[in-house]
Amino acid sequence: MTDKEQAAPPDLTLTEQELFQRLGWFTQVRWGAGVCAIAFMAIGWHLFGVRFSWAPALAVVAALFAYNLVFSVWARQLYRRRGIRKSWITTLAHAQITCDLLATAALVHMIGGVENHFVILFLFPIMVACEFFPMRTAFLYATLAAVLINFIGWGEWTFYATAHHALAVIPVHGGPSPAPLVAAEAASHWVFVLQVCVAMTFAVYTTVFITGSIAARLRGREEELARAHRDLKSLEQVKSQFMRKTSHELRAPIGAMQSLLKAAVGQMAPEAPGRELVDRCIRRSESTMDLIDDLLRYSRLQASAIQPRFEPVDLAEVVRIAADLFRTQAEEKGIQLEVRTEPAVLLGDRDGLTDLADNLISNAIRYTLTGGRVTVEVNGRDGDPRLTVSDTGIGIPPDDLPRIFEEFFRGEKAKQAVQHGTGLGMTIAKRVADMHGGRIEVASEVGRGTTFRVYFPQLNRRA
């Protein structure tokens, strides 16, 4: 599975996502386990002269690779399926652990049975069972492992002549034939078989008790974190709803006040007493409207219940419309606004892309002094669609650059240049870029200007 396929589907709880990711990890580990089994058998055979039934042993490893491939395909199908259920994940985990125990039993039987110290391999699937399931279920798997161990030991003891695959080793000083690796015919002595079976049975149950106890405590912590995450998510939804509702309620009266003030100032003589106060009220109302608009955009991006509608969008068209809205503002400040675009179609949310362009262009004009220049470019011919907004404004100090995308952050230099601001513009831009699978970069030099570049994935790659 690739990194993307290892990531759990987002419609699962935190606990279920962790379980799904462990399945991906478990599948990868099994590939490594199969390779290690072949390597150990090859080292034992060629380096240490250990002799065993290599053909059946390799057949078991081949079977391990085969069913692991099936589990990998199964996991991919689960990832792509919508409305995935936890029961499907646990079923896949049960199947993997059961197959691993059976494969371990077959491999141990083929390379010496109870005579081989690698009978300890039975402990590893048991540890994995403790990771996936409650202790009661893990004890059932421990019982299955104990049954398989005793079946191998007593089955080979009963049918020693036909069922046992003895381990042998070529003598260091040479000899007529390989000698037994352990005591001759050890698997035919009931005391030896009893000793190994009792020791391994005790080991698997002890492993479950120790590993399961630790896993249970960690699982409890995971449940606590999952509950805390759900509570925080609910609070976030309440906060977003409050922000949206409050912003909507404030927008109408502030807009009405702004209209009345503009109408009043239009009827006043240029030198009329109180005109300056009315002008100040108009500027404050405009700042308040900007704040309300930013809060509305921010709350919309924060609300997970509101799903963006992705469709083919020409980024150049969105940027041209946004630039036209701010052209009058740029002209009033004596700022030259240059717009250079070329077709750049991407799969995106038009409203979100509009918010992105509005914030980048308005910020560039706001923090550029009279006589400066703001350049807006859209490129799409040489690869991924790209939006670039450059200005010759005040610039961003190096200490502020790492924080410019934080919520409500405004540097001291920005506050000195423009008194009023929300500190949400760059946060909104970053959220929109992330939402589209893109990235945003910034380069700035104090006193010389700032450049923002937003890179988006191509239409065909995102689709």
Image (cartoon, rainbow, N blue to C red):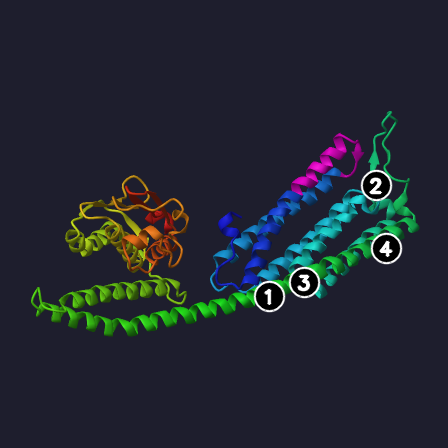
Of circles 2 and 3, the one toward us is: 3
Residue topped by disc 2: 166
Please tell me which residue lies in front, 67 or 362: 362
Relative height, residue 119 to residue 261 (above, below): above
* Residue at numbered disc 3: 217
Question: What residue appears at the point 82 percent right and 53 percent down from the top-left corner?
Answer: 200
Dot in front, 4 or 1: 1
Task: Please name the amino acid that badge 1 sits on.
Answer: Glu
* Cα distance between the residues tagged 2 and 3: 43 Å
Residue 248 horizontal/vertical position (percent): 29, 72
| First along the sequence among labels 2 and 1 | 2
Q: Which residue is mark 4?
A: 198
On the picture, is 245 further left or further right than 206? left
- Mark number displayed over residue 223: 1
Query: Label 1, label 3: how many angstroms apart (C-alpha)?
Result: 10 Å
Which of the pair 400/386 is nearer the observer? Answer: 400
Judged from the image, the secondary structure of the residue bearing numbered disc 4 is helix
The kind of residue tagged 4 is Val
Rounded to the nearest angstrom, the CA distance separating label 4 from label 1 is 36 Å
Q: Is residue 421 magenta?
A: no
Q: Residue at x 86, y 55 (%)?
A: 198
Which of labels 2 and 4 is toward the front? 4
Of the two numbered discs 3 and 4 on the same chain, state the one appearing first in sequence: 4
The tag earlier along the polypeptide, 2 or 4, is 2
Q: Helix, strand or loop at disc 2? A: loop
**Does 51 appear above or below 205?**
above
